[in-house]
Every structure is written in structure tokens, then in C-alpha cells.
Amino acid sequence: MTTSPNMVVDAWRAEGSDKRLLDFLAWWNVNGSFIIRVAWQGGPRTPAEQLALWAKGRGLQGGKWVIVALKDVVTWAQGPDDAPHVHAGAVDVEPLIEGRALDPKEGAQFYDAIAAAAVAKGLVAGNNWAGVKKDARHLEVPNFRALPLYSNSAELVAGAVVLGLALLLFFHA
């Protein structure tokens, strides 16, 4: 009996994602024709993580947030409700060819193959979006806004500590 190579690398980064995304990664692991990797910060994100990524490529000018470096913009989502990663409804993947992650320009045919497979499995592929908002690495479930906001245990513990300290200060004041 032969075993197929692991066709999905760093799948742990997608832990906590919607089952449809995890099912796609499992399907690719068996049926994919090349290796893909779940990108750094490519799985579920807390609202704080999303906000930090949103700020990349942007800066305050005249009291308003504006794009100052388009090449550095990571996300177009305007807030947690608009961000599929914050609902655990998206993953970002990239092809690994000869051990190297390809960017969307040099690996267009690989991103096209990932997008076609994802769409065939009922997902939305950012590779199919038009214009500047095209996101070749991005796969999402079509109804992500119906999913609850993602939170990890570390964020919940940190929030509880902050709340506890605030209550302690309030009642001792």
C-alpha cells in the first residue's frame, strides 16, 4: 500500500476554522496535485489580530485612516463583522513548490488550481475577485457573517484578567 505525501503543510494554523474549510484542506491533503501551506496568520483571527493586520499599509493623515503603502495592505475588511477570518470562516493558503512558497504572480497557475478546487467544493476564492482587492491566497465560506466571532482561550483569559483588574479598581476606589 502506498501513502500519499502530506499535501497540506502547517494545517494547524487553520485549527478552529469552519468545518467546510477544514474539509477542503483534508480533501486537498488526499487529492491535491501539489503541496499547499496554510499561510502565517492565515486561519482564524481574534478581532485584535485582525485590527493589527488592517493597520498595515495604512496611516493617519488629517485625522483619517488612509492607505499609505498599497503593497503593505493585508486586508480590506473594515471591521470584525466584515472579516471572515474573525468568524473563523476563511483560510489563506499558498502553494509550496520545491519547498518555496510562491507569490500570486509567479504561481498564478497554482493559485488558479487551488481556487478552482475550492469553488468546486462550495467555497469562495479570493483569487476570483477583481481589481486591487483580489486575494489569491484567500478561501472563505459563502455565509461567514452568520458564524460567531472567533475567540481563542488566551484572549478570553486576558480579557477576564483585564475585567477583574477593572472591577478591583472600581470597587476599591
Image (tube, rainbow, N blue to C red):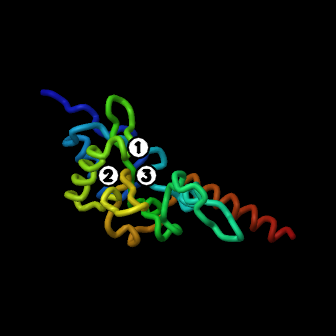
- The numbered disc on residue 43 is 3
- The numbered disc on residue 12 is 1
Q: Amino acid at mark 3?
A: Gly
Position in image of residue 62 (x %, y %): 71, 70
| Residue 113 located left or right of residue 85 | left
Q: Relative to 35, is 85 above or below?
A: below
Q: Are marks 1 and 3 in contact (CB under 8 Å)?
A: no
Position in image of residue 90 (x %, y %): 39, 58
> Disc 3 and disc 2: Cα gap in Å?
10 Å
Quadrant in which the C terminus is drawn: bottom right
- The numbered disc on residue 22 is 2
Q: Closer to the camera, 4 or 159?
A: 4
Residue at point 75%, 66% (across, down): 166
Q: Amino acid at mark 1?
A: Trp
Residue at point 26%, 45% (across, down): 109
Q: Residue furthest right?
A: 173
Quadrant in which the N terminus is drawn: top left
> Disc 2 and disc 1: Cα gap in Å?
10 Å
Q: Closer to the camera, 145 or 65?
A: 65
Position in image of residue 80 (x %, y %): 51, 67
Q: Residues within 10 Å of mark 2 (few under 14, many from 20)?
A: some
